[in-house]
Image (spheres, rainbow, N blue to C red):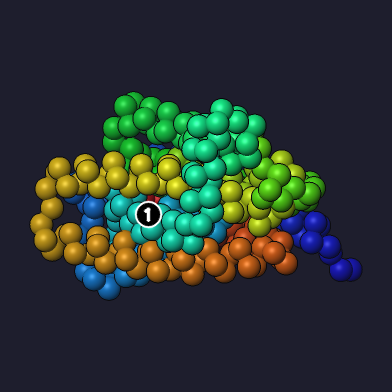
Amino acid sequence: MTLSKRQWFGLLSAASVTFSVVAFDLKVLGTQPNVGENGVQQMNILQAIVLGFVQGMTEFLPISSTAHLKVVPVVLGWGDPGVAFTAIIQLGSIAAVLWYFWRDLTRIFKGAFKAITHKDYDDYDFRLFLGIILGTLPIIFFGLLIKKFIPDFDNSPIRSLGAIAIASIVMSLLLGLAERLGKRQRDFEHLSMQDGVLMGLAQTLALIPGVSRSGSTLTSGLFMGLKRETAARFSFLLGIPAITLAGLVELKDVIGAGLTSAAIVPIVVGVISAAIFSYISIVGLLRFLKTQTTWVFIWYRLAFGVAILTAIGTGVLKNS
């Protein structure tokens, strides 16, 4: 008997959830990660290039760059690079998205400024600009709450491998539903201010490691009836303010804490590496989504989460 994609998805989903509950001891979610001083692990140039590659190739794909920046170095025996390093090298990804969307951004800003000058608040560029601004506010608000009430977030159990694995599985299921239920009728020229607000709310889920900012916004975009490429493009634009602010805040904190030249050089190399591979990722994903579905990412996220839980459950990896 041949199973359809939907049947396979249902079977694997049920299997992954069952494994999560039965084979994985949930109390290990309380295990504390081990990160370096000031949130940044000491690393060499090669490690920085590799982590920049991981950041760049996963930031804009709906598979969570944060999860991969935590899992990959742990698997390689390098240790957790920390929240600060993760946030700082995202500035390389921002440089890439600014480079790629410079014409779009210039048009939006010029159009919004002209609309404000002429008090034409129904102008498309103005509404899109306002949608991006309003969509950024939720993640800033909740990000500040985390900073205030969870000051030791870098060592929080929510950044453990087990938590990341479960988040990856849950988001694979949601993206699968969005892929099945989304009507995919609206293109980039039919975006609204409401789309920015709703995708901005979905973007706040990315504060949970393993969720993926790109994944949560792409999923919400599909649920709202956007075409795949349109949802991805708007997700990139919406992420510019949030990722930039997060990177600059962490950069300021790290510089204020004091870093040696030996620690600064790998960070710079990581940012450059992330910028190069982020650009490649953006170009590739937008071309891919013009003709393909998101199922490859759904299966990958499901397998990624189950593989981590299996490795923890069998003792191959520590839930750190």
Mark 1: few/some/many CA within 10 Å (<14, 14-19, 20+): many
Secondary structure of the residue carrying numbered label 1: helix
Closer to us: 240 or 45: 240
Would residue 171 appear left or right of 9 to someone viewing this image?
A: left
The residue at 46%/66% (across/down) is 279
Q: Is residue 22 visible?
A: no
Closer to us: 18 or 109: 109
Residue extending farthest to the right is: 1
Would residue 34 appear left or right of 26 to someone viewing this image?
A: left
Closer to us: 150 or 54: 54
Q: Position of residue 46 (x, y in %)?
A: 27, 73
Q: Position of residue 285 (x, y in %)?
A: 59, 64
89 is higher (above) or lower (below) than 206: below
155 is higher (above) or lower (below) than 78: above
What amino acid is labelled 1 in the image? Gln
Would residue 83 appear left or right of 103 to someone viewing this image?
A: left
The part of the image, by quadrant, that contains residue 242 is: top left
Residue extending farthest to the bottom is: 46
Q: Is residue 7 visible?
A: yes
Badge 1 is on which residue? 90
The part of the image, by quadrant, that contains residue 293 is: bottom right
The residue at 53%/46% (across/down) is 108
Location of the N terminus (image quadrant):
bottom right
Number of numbered discs overlaid on the protein picture: 1
The residue at 29%/41% (across/down) is 249
The residue at 29%/69% (across/down) is 47
Would residue 27 appear left or right of 247 to someone viewing this image?
A: right
Q: Position of residue 77 (x, y in %)?
A: 31, 66
Q: Position of residue 290 (x, y in %)?
A: 69, 64
